[in-house]
Image (tube, helix red, strand yellow):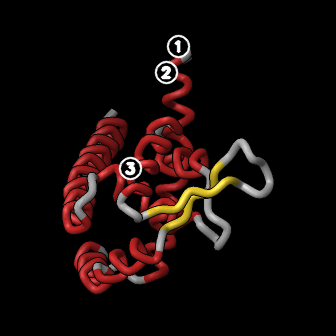
Amino acid sequence: MAEKQEINRAIRDFIWNIVEIHSQLEEIHKSWALMLGITEPQWLILMAIDELDEGRGVSGIAVATKLRIHPAFVTNQTKKLEQIEFLTRVTSPDDARFLQISLTERARAEVSKLSLKREALNATMFEGLDEASLDYLNRRLTSIATNSRLASQRLNVGLL
């Protein structure tokens, strides 16, 4: 019985730590966005495109999947980011029904200006963790994320 209580306490502590980290990351993203004169969701869209683009642009669906948001919201926000010349949206050469989205040189320059601050922030956030520790942590978090999606699906269909 005591062992079960300890594991339940450890799980609750873990969840509250994740809530705290999420809250802090949200504040950090808001700060980066403010520096560029955009919203936090727009910042996240820019970062997702930067992460996913391998030179041909990315689809709005890929961005929506990465951020776990609705594709229509991505479409709406990328139009706004295109208006302020942070993104280009061109018809996909493979399928005219889809757009390929890329950062503009202006957006890359603005994000690049923040790179020293971002590196300093990352150094502070991950102080004391080496590459092997981060790799281990990321593998465990990936497993927990996968299991969380499964648990959420089960809960939504009444299996839990």
- Left or right: 50, with 115 as reference point: right
155, 8: nearer the viewer: 155
Mark number displayed over residue 80: 3
Q: Earlier in the sequence, mark 3 or mark 1?
A: 3
User: In this rendering, which labeled residue sits more in front, label 3 or label 2?
Assistant: 3
* Residue 1 figure quarter: top left
Q: From the image, tell me which residue sits under label 2.
A: 155
Q: Residues within 10 Å of mark 3 (few under 14, many from 20)?
A: some
Residue ranking furthest to the bottom: 116
Question: Label 1, on which residue?
Answer: 158
Task: Kindly state the secondary structure of the residue where label 3 is placed.
Answer: helix
Residue 82 picture quarter = bottom left
Q: Amino acid at mark 2?
A: Leu
Is 149 positioned to the left or the right of 107 in the image? right
Report if the CB atoms under discs 2 and 1 are less than 8 Å apart. yes
- For residue 35, side relative to residue 126 (left or right): left
Residue depicted at x 40% and y 64%: 85
Give the image location of residue 40, x and y in percent.
28, 53
Asked if disc 3 and disc 1 are in contact, CB closer than 8 Å, the reply is: no
Mark 3: amino acid: Lys
Vertical relation: 21 (above or below) 65: below
Residue 147, percent from left and from top: 54, 41
Which amino acid is tagged 1?
A: Gly
Q: CA distance from mark 3 to mark 2?
A: 36 Å
Depth check: 105 or 15 in front? 105
> How far across and down, in percent of the image, does residue 99 sit?
63, 51
Residue at x 47%, y 56% (from the top left corner):
141
Q: SS at mark 1?
A: loop
Residue sitting at x 51%, y 31%: 151
